[in-house]
Amino acid sequence: MGHRFQTKLERPNLRPVNAFWSHRMAAVGAVWILLWLFIAIAGSAIRPDATPMANDQHLERGLLAPGAEWLDEAGDMHTAWLGTDRYGRDLLSRLMAGSGISLSVGAGAVVISLILGLLLGGLAGYMGGRVDRVLSWFLQVMWSIPTLLMVLAITLAFGKGFWQVFLAIGLTMWVEVARIVRGQFLSLREQAYVQAAEALDLPAWRIMLRHMLPNAVGPLVVVCAANFAAAILIEAGLSFLGVGAQIPMPSWGNIVKEHAHLLTTDHAWLALIPGALIASLVLAFTWVGDGLRHAMHDPR
């Protein structure tokens, strides 16, 4: 009694998932991101150089070409698949270690931007009136400040380092999230189910979280993918400028910085390979964003 019995098996709607994976470039991007996510999570267990931050130095093996081999003291053969830098550090290991920095900065920036964007954008869109006018003015002010300038100001105020960049990038990306949430909530608050919830005198936070937010997830997922790509690019740029992750932490940006002077020499690959990885990961997140947009607008 009191239970509803199903006459047939209900299966989840897989159309958005299928639509995403049918987008060829999005699928390629997702696989590439998952590969580097696995590398970042696995950490030193799968790196040729398992030392902290892949910082094992052997000056006698400096600037070895990709694929170079050598024997260690025990007579075991080793291969530097991507060569070594001027300090004899294995480039492949440092790039693998640097993937964790890029992905963690991207994830942290997205989380911070979501928290601030949902809070301020949701309040502006749902409350309306004076609250909306004040918050919209604040959003316009923040929107007018160039992102890189804001990141540099915050980084210089809090100091140089990984955690400072982590915080600075997140605090500059919430504006776009807030604008999207505000726009979604302005239209959703006119829906009959929201007005019914208000008539039942449900708390505002419950209406926003339980009834409005789930219907605004689509655009948010797309903008989060774009923000992830932007965060990786900004972190690499800041590390290249010397205000991001500090040496010997193997950020892809500071690896490029260390070897930028070699671009016109026979050792240009030391700067080109990490630069190509930055570009490929940013492009992968862009493709994933396009795939998500395609899946969200797929006709049902």
Image (cartoon, rainbow, N blue to C red):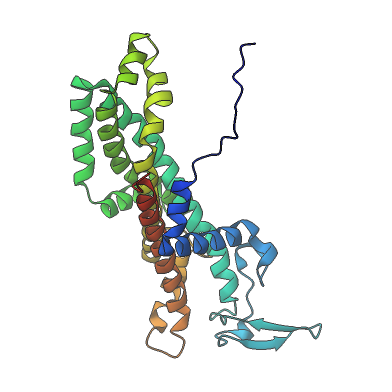
Left or right: 34 with respect to 143?
Answer: right
Left or right: 30 with respect to 242?
Answer: right
At x 39%, y 81%, the residue is: 261
- Can residue 249 be seen here? The reply is no
Q: Quadrant of residue 185?
A: top left
Residue 9 picture location, percent across and down: 60, 35
At x 62%, y 88%, the residue is: 68
Left or right: 46 with respect to 153?
Answer: right
Quadrant of the drawing holding the C terminus: top left
Closer to us: 183 or 240: 183
Closer to us: 183 or 229: 183
Q: Residue furthest right?
A: 74
Residue 2 picture location, percent across and down: 61, 11
At x 37%, y 41%, the residue is: 218
Q: Quadrant of residue 61?
A: bottom right
Residue 92 picture location, percent across and down: 57, 74
Q: Residue furthest bottom?
A: 266
Closer to us: 300 or 94: 300
Closer to us: 238 or 173: 173
Residue 250 picture location, percent across and down: 52, 65
Q: How many marks?
A: 0
Quadrant of the drawing holding the N terminus: top right
At x 19%, y 39%, the residue is: 141
- Can residue 280 be seen here? The reply is yes
